[in-house]
């Protein structure tokens, strides 16, 4: 049998990127975070270098591993698959070979650890399948069926949201400004720094993506930037203002997105990952999504990087951030978060 070799792909070469993306789209378990466009958007939006490994046999790509070299003065360095994604681990064949190549690359560029989000784990790596849950289910045939697919208690909340005087708007770049303002307030209230606005622009330009915004009396109160891939919608960066809770605007937003995605030809709704035992995980379960453990793997030299905001050592930082005036949080947040990945 022909041996499997691993090399780094040149994402500046359009033909090579096209070949990688063709492999991704043909592979089971692929996500939008495996596409080369995601790696380039993260590099442009946050200044963190994209490194993309491919496994080949007989000149054909048989495996892929997108990586981002994260560097932060606050949170250290790591080679992450993939930067700012919730998935993007090893795809296809050559799992151990790709893992060894990633580890060798990390040592060569001075990163003390490698983090893989999703996909199979290379042999001997530290694994974790208890910290995160993924939430995915099929979309129903229409809005009425979608309502019936939502458990009774949450269905009542959706019906209440539909009774409020809210309007829903979908679009592209023109909605990014309002989306960013809503998202920035939302994550400040959660105690985490907002990502750079450039990251959202770069992702929206490079990926199959759009924005859905809910307004009350003309003002944006909830908004989500979603990715689309292989018939699945991924509501990725979403949130609401303080006013959104009383208006049930987040419920309206996700229900509207289900209908919007269905109209775009989607059949699946990927609600993303949430930490086990958190309110976010409970919210998704209330919508009728069953949590499935996500497998993450890492290898490190010494203590591995830990950027989980639920880590007790960050508790004071989270509480302090929640109290920051929004303009201050928005000014400092992008500088901090570009190294979180």
Image (tube, rainbow, N blue to C red):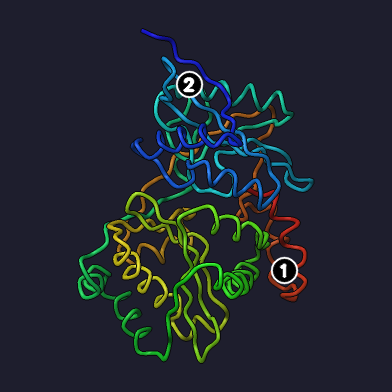
Q: Position of residue 292 (x, y in %)?
A: 36, 48
Q: Secondary structure at mark 2?
A: helix
Spatial separation of the CA atoms under disc 2 and disc 1? 41 Å
Residue placed most toward the observer, 309 or 135: 135
Which of the 4 image quadrants contains residue 76?
A: top right
**Residue shown at 72% from the left, 73% from the top:** 323
Q: Earlier in the sequence, mark 2 or mark 1?
A: 2
**Residue shown at 25% from the left, 70% from the top:** 146
Residue placed most toward the observer, 43 or 78: 43
Tell me, for residue 96, which label it has, or none.
Answer: 2
Q: Secondary structure at mark 1?
A: helix
Residue placed most toward the observer, 105 or 134: 105
Residue placed most toward the observer, 61 or 145: 61
Quadrant of image for the N terminus:
top left
The local crowd at label 2, few if under 14, some if 14 to 19, many if 20 or more residues have their Cα within 10 Å, is: some
Which residue is under mark 1?
Answer: 330
Q: Position of residue 144 (x, y in %)?
A: 21, 75
Q: Position of residue 117 (x, y in %)?
A: 50, 40
**Residue shown at 55% from the left, 38% from the top:** 81
Q: Is the residue 181 above or below the residue 126 in the image?
A: below
Question: Is 316 on the left or on the right of 85, as rendered?
Answer: right
């Amino acid at each position: 049998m022909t041996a499997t070799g691993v090399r780094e792909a040149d994402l500046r070469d359009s033909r090579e990127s096209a070949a990688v993306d063709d492999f991704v789209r043909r592979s089971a378990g692929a996500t939008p975070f495996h596409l080369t466009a995601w790696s380039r958007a993260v590099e442009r939006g946050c200044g963190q270098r994209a490194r993309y490994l491919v496994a080949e046999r007989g000149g054909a790509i048989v495996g892929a591993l997108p990586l981002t070299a994260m560097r932060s003065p606050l949170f250290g360095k790591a080679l992450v698959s993939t930067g700012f994604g919730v998935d993007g681990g090893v795809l296809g064949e050559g799992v151990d070979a790709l893992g060894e190549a990633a580890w060798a690359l990390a040592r060569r560029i001075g990163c003390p650890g490698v983090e893989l989000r999703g996909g199979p784990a290379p042999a001997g790596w530290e694994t974790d399948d208890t910290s995160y849950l993924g939430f995915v289910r099929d979309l129903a045939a229409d809005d009425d069926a979608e309502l019936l697919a939502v458990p009774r208690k949450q269905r009542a909340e959706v019906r209440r949201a539909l009774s409020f005087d809210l309007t829903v708007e979908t679009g592209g770049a023109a909605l990014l400004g309002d989306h960013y303002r809503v998202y920035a307030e939302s994550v400040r209230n959660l105690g985490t720094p907002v990502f750079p606005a450039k990251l959202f622009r770069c992702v929206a330009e490079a990926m199959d993506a759009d924005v859905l915004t809910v307004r009350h009396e003309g003002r944006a109160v909830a908004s989500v930037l979603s990715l689309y891939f292989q018939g699945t919608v991924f509501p990725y960066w979403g949130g609401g203002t303080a006013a959104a809770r009383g208006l049930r605007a987040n419920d309206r937003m996700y229900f509207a997105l289900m209908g919007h995605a269905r109209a775009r030809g989607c059949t699946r709704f990927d609600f993303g990952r949430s930490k086990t035992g958190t309110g976010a995980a409970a919210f998704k379960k209330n919508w009728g999504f069953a949590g499935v453990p996500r497998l993450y793997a890492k290898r490190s030299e010494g203590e591995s990087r830990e950027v989980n905001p639920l880590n007790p050592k960050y508790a004071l930082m989270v509480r302090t951030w929640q109290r920051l005036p929004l303009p201050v949080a928005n000014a400092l947040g992008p500088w901090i978060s570009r190294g979180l990945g």
